[in-house]
Amino acid sequence: MPRSNAQVVKKQVQVSSYERLCRRINAYIAEPHAQLEQRCRVERLETDHDDDWERVVDEMREVDGLSVEQSGNGYEFSWRGMPAAD
């Protein structure tokens, strides 16, 4: 017997603030214009946590061929010479 909508309980997945920031940065990087230019700028939001940004920047600075520079209220990511993302 099929379940009614009332019987189906959806599981909510908790996403950390760090994961949300990573997803936002990845979305900017994946944009066609960013891929063409091999760079993007991501603004910090008021809701972003300082420790999340610090962690992301530290991790991304370890990637060969990726440049991370603070730019105003955000960061500029550039990857000249690196292959485009699929």
Image: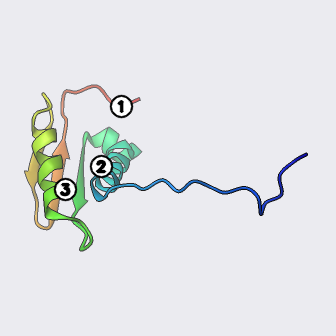
Residue placed under numbered mark 3 in the picture: 52
Using a 10 Å C-alpha cutoff, classify the residue at mark 1 as few (fewer than 14 neighbours), some (14 to 19) or many (20 or more): few
Q: Nearer the viewer, mark 2 or mark 3?
A: 3
Amino acid type assigned to the residue bearing label 1 in the image: Ala
Q: Position of residue 48 (x, y in %)?
A: 24, 66
Disc 2 element: helix
In which image quadrant can residue 68 be found? top left
* Residue shown at the point (79%, 60%) measured from the top left: 5
In this view, the residue farthest toward the bottom is: 46
Disc 3 element: helix
In which image quadrant can residue 58 be found? top left
Disc 1 element: loop
* Residue shown at the point (36%, 49%) measured from the top left: 23
Q: Which mark is residue 22?
A: 2
Q: Position of residue 54 (x, y in %)?
A: 11, 53
Q: Which mark is residue 85?
A: 1
Q: Is residue 4 above or below residue 26?
A: below
* Residue shown at the point (38%, 49%) measured from the top left: 27
Q: Earlier in the sequence, mark 2 or mark 3?
A: 2
Amino acid type assigned to the residue bearing label 3 in the image: Asp
Horizontal placement of 17 versus 74: left or right?
right
Disc 3 to disc 1, C-alpha distance: 23 Å
Amino acid type assigned to the residue bearing label 2 in the image: Cys
